[in-house]
Image (cartoon, rainbow, N blue to C red):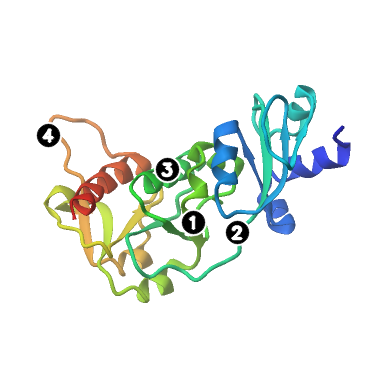
C-alpha cells in the first residue's frame, strides 16, 4: 500500500525547485530504470505494477502508479534516485557544451548522442533546461545514467579550456573538412538564438554543416546539428 503523502511527494518532483530541495528525481520505464540501477546513482525508492525483481521494489496498483507518474500514460516501473553530487567541471575532452538549449526533447536527444559516441560530459549554461526534468529523463531513454551534465557560467569555464573549442554556425569551415583532436570541445547554441555573443568570443574555430544548393530549409534543429557533428567526430575518434 502506498500512502497519499508518498504519491504527492513523487508528483512534486515534476518541478525543478522540488527536485533541488529534495535532491531527488524520477525515472520511469523498465529499460530506463534498469539503466539507472546499473549506474553509480543511489536508488531512493522503486515501484512497479507487475513483475520486476529488485530487493527495494514495492508492488503497487496501476491506479496508484498513474496518480504519481509524470507521464500521460504511466509505465509499469517508476524509480526515485538521489541527484548526483556536484563534481569538478571537466577540462579534458571530448566535451559537449550547450548554450541556452531550452527544449527538453532536444537536450534528451543530445544526451543520447553523447552516450552513443562515448562522450561522458556535457557542460550547460544556467539557462539550459534541467537534465532531470521528467521530459528530458524520458527522452534520454536511460542514457542520462551514463552522461554527466554540469551547469555553470560558460564564459569563465571556457576560459580555462586549453583545447580547441568548436562552435556551430551558419558560416564557417565545413565540418567534413576538419580533423578533430580527441581533446576537442563542441559548443551548440539555443534553438532560437544560436550561440550567445560572450560564448562566441571564446570559440577558436567556427564550423558549419553544408547544405544542398537546392534546399529551402533555413537551418537544422540543434539536436540534428549535434548528430551530424558528433557523427563526424565519432568516425574520426573511433578510427584513432
Q: Quadrant of the C terminus?
A: bottom left
User: Secondary structure under badge 1?
Assistant: strand
Going by the image, does 154 lie left or right of 221? right
* Mark nearer the N terminus (3 vs 2): 2
Q: Nearer the viewer, mark 1 or mark 4?
A: 1
Residue at mark 1 to residue at mark 2: CA–CA distance: 9 Å
Q: Nearer the viewer, residue 225 or 33?
A: 33
Q: Nearer the viewer, mark 2 or mark 4?
A: 2
Query: How many marks are shown on the rendered structure?
Result: 4
From the viewer's perspective, tell me whether residue 101 is left or right of residue 181. right
**Above or below: residue 74 compared with residue 82:** above
Marking on residue 84: 2
Label 3 CA crowd tier, 10 Å (few <14, some 14–19, many 20+): many
Between tags 3 and 4, which lies in front? Answer: 3
Residue 48 found in image quarter: top right
Q: Residue at x 51, y 62 (%)?
A: 151
Element under label 4? loop
User: Disc 3 and disc 2: Cα gap in Å?
Assistant: 18 Å
Within 10 Å of the Cα at label 4, are there few (<14), some (14-19), or many (20+) other Cα atoms? Answer: few
Residue 203 locus on image (x, y percent): 28, 66
Compare marks 2 and 4 and give the one earlier in the sequence. Answer: 2
Please say whether residue 222 is visible from this viewpoint: yes
Q: Which residue is mark 4?
A: 213
Query: Which residue is identified by label 1?
Result: 148
Amino acid at each position: 500500500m502506498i500512502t497519499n503523502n508518498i504519491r504527492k511527494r513523487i508528483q512534486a518532483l515534476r518541478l525543478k525547485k522540488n527536485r533541488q530541495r529534495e535532491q531527488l528525481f524520477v525515472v520511469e520505464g523498465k529499460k530506463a530504470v534498469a539503466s539507472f540501477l546499473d549506474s553509480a546513482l543511489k536508488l531512493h525508492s522503486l515501484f512497479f505494477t507487475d513483475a520486476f525483481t529488485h530487493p527495494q521494489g514495492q508492488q503497487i496498483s496501476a491506479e496508484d502508479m498513474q496518480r504519481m507518474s509524470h507521464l500521460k500514460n504511466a509505465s509499469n516501473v517508476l524509480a526515485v534516485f538521489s541527484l548526483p553530487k556536484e563534481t569538478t567541471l571537466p577540462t579534458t575532452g571530448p566535451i559537449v557544451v550547450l548554450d541556452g538549449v531550452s527544449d527538453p526533447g532536444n537536450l534528451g536527444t543530445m544526451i543520447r548522442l553523447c552516450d552513443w559516441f562515448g562522450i561522458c560530459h556535457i557542460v550547460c549554461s544556467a539557462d539550459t533546461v534541467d537534465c532531470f526534468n521528467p521530459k528530458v529523463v524520458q527522452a534520454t531513454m536511460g542514457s542520462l545514467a551514463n552522461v554527466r551534465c554540469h551547469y555553470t557560467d560558460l564564459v569563465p569555464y571556457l576560459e580555462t579550456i586549453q583545447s580547441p573549442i568548436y562552435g556551430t554556425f551558419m558560416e564557417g569551415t565545413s565540418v567534413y573538412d576538419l580533423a578533430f583532436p580527441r581533446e576537442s570541445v563542441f559548443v551548440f547554441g539555443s534553438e532560437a538564438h544560436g550561440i550567445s555573443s560572450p560564448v562566441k568570443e571564446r570559440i577558436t574555430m567556427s564550423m558549419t554543416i553544408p547544405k544542398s544548393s537546392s534546399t529551402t530549409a533555413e537551418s537544422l534543429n540543434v539536436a540534428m546539428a549535434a548528430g551530424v557533428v558528433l557523427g563526424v567526430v565519432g568516425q574520426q575518434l573511433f578510427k584513432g
